[in-house]
Image: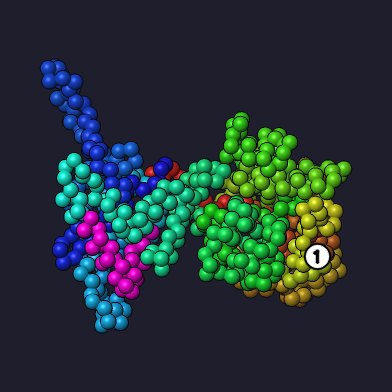
Amino acid sequence: MDVNPLCVILVKNGSRGDQLLFRYPYTTDITLHTESKNKRPTPYSLITEDTIQKSQVSRTSNIANGKLVGFSDKVISNLFAVKIELCDSKFELKVNDVRFVGHPIRLNSASAPARTKTQRKLSSIILFHIVFALKANLNHDVVNCYHDLSMRLGLALRHEEYRCQFLSTQAKLMLSAHDDASQLPEDGQVSPFQLILDRSLLARHLKQSYDELCGSGIVQLRVNNWIEVSFCLPQKVHRSLATGLPVDCEGLVDGLRNLKPYHTFLLLVSKADLMCSLPPDSSQALWRLLQVEESHLMPFFTLAADADLTLNQVLMLVGHLVYWGKATIIYPVCSTNIYVLSHNAPTILNSQLCESFQEQFPGSSLHAAMAEFSMPTSLSDKTKPIDSPLQQQEQVEQIVWLLKHGILQQLHTYVYLTPPPSRTGSRELGWCGGGQLGSHGTSSPASTSIHTPTTVHEPPPPPTPTTVHEPSSHPPPSSLHHQHDPLPHPPPSSLHHDPPPPSQLQPGDLTRAALHHAAVQLSHPPSESDLGSVCSDERSPSPGVTVGVTGEDSVVRTLDATLTPAERELVMKVEAACNPDDLKLFAKLCIYFRGQHHLEEMMYRVNLRRSQLLHLIDKFRPVLLTCQHIDPSITLYTHTNHIHTD
């Protein structure tokens, strides 16, 4: 739905009463449009019984050609020059199919600086009000954004009024233009608002705001060449991305709260253009972040180290870039990433994206590149060993281009711990009432209610020789396939073979020596990304159970903290449970085997290589299932039709 404003209006209330100062657009040659249902075609038509029973329903529209019509200047001033009690709060009014939203500002109040009251003449304006006219069926999400812009403009004008009486000066120019226009002869009459545009800087500010809202959705102006006002309408900005659909602002903000240290960002605009658009007093931290080369290959905690910033600073800066439509969130591009076509991928021949792709990569076809990802494909499968470094670099650049335009989406592998069969023969998740498993051993995201923790202040794991992401390495795109997984490992597709038959081992077959060896290893102090800190965020251990205690039964206690008795019995029957090292690692990871954490998150939290994690999953294949879907934590917004309901 169109989220453009219909009109921007400025009214004031002062010693001369309320008056409309300016409105834009100011077209006045469009009359009010009224439709009537069940009208008789002619005065001589027969009046039937159905016509008598049906009431005459009239519908009046105050919108014509995307402009506000049907309101005289006097009516507008009476509506929006509100009482003092309504000042400094949100104003919202619905008339027919138009919704007016604003934030009336009071002058000469207790909020005025003391030096203004003593050194300057008090303004004759009691209050002023900047109002945006919108379509009445817009979502409250959009209405709240316009209210925020009205408040920002109002506060900037109040500051300039207290500083140099800017508003009073501009109001006198506008009132003078109204008087001059009324004195012109009939054959030479012009709109007073046209004269105001020629004379008033404030009127040009309001016109600029309206034009930028209808254009890019980003307002950047400097009121009176002094106070900078910046505003982003995300529903407009994010429509210009690959999906072309409006977004939910609340969903966008909630998604930004779910950023994790192992995520990264991908610029949607060129770095040079972004730096040129930054104001002179912009944050130096942002400049340092943008100067890091190939940021899409490194996670946030690595970027923070390279840019000499804290992780919180990086997350806040990236959140601003995403909100303003300058960047998007991805997982760092590496050889093990599995990509598939997005459901919103454009498939039209000779589209604008096809031309842009051919300009960026001469001799390549967008549809041919899209066809390679019609099924889930990893970057390592797409790369041929005989390709030259330049060809590999171009393939990586194509992946980045497709991600930037929303054509590809990444699939992540999630692990589920399978419970023992129930008496009815159905296989149900045995923890917190999980959803039903599918017939093929997979579970859809909707049926399992997948969600991720919202902790964003998660410190990176301490660097060790087995760290997944090495902060000090900066591999070129051609060496991308060795960035996150230095050791060889089976491809993700190997996780989907049929599981072997369960072992006939009994729980008593686990020797006392193996339990003692695993208990000694579990007694080591855990790191911040270990099971202890995760249990506090995801699922606290049972009362009386301490993770990491010494003793021969520490492994059993660790499993009891996260597994049900039936699940624990099933795990102990697996042949790999006889190995104390494997059992210790399984006990550390079993809290993540609920379909809520993908492999990349496990690698980060437990500080494992992918090969180690996949090897463990294969060993415990009789009790584990895997499935692939997108990561909901970086799905930053949901698409809505922006229909408002009262």
Residue at screen point 26% across, 67% down:
168
Q: Position of residue 621 (x, y in %)?
A: 77, 50
Give the residue type at disc 1: Thr
Would you name the residue on which mark 1 appears?
A: 466
Viewer-proximal residue, 90 or 278?
278
Q: Secondary structure at mark 1?
A: loop
Q: From where the camera sits, is residue 533 visible?
A: no
Quarter the N terminus occupies: top left
Q: Position of residue 478 (x, y in %)?
A: 80, 52
**Residue 175 lies in the magenta-colored region:** yes
453 up-or-down from 52: above or below:
below
The stretch in magenta equals 149-177
Q: Left or right: 36 with respect to 378?
A: left
Q: Position of residue 218 (x, y in %)?
A: 46, 54
Viewer-proximal residue, 641 or 201?
201
For the stretch drawn in magenta, what is the main secondary structure? helix
Q: Left or right: 31 with respect to 485?
A: left
Residue at screen point 59% across, 60% down:
275
Q: Position of residue 181 (x, y in %)?
A: 20, 50
Viewer-proximal residue, 42 or 420?
42
Viewer-proximal residue, 638 or 599?
638
Residue 561's image quarter?
bottom right
341 up-or-down from 567: above or below:
above
Residue at screen point 34% across, 71% down:
159
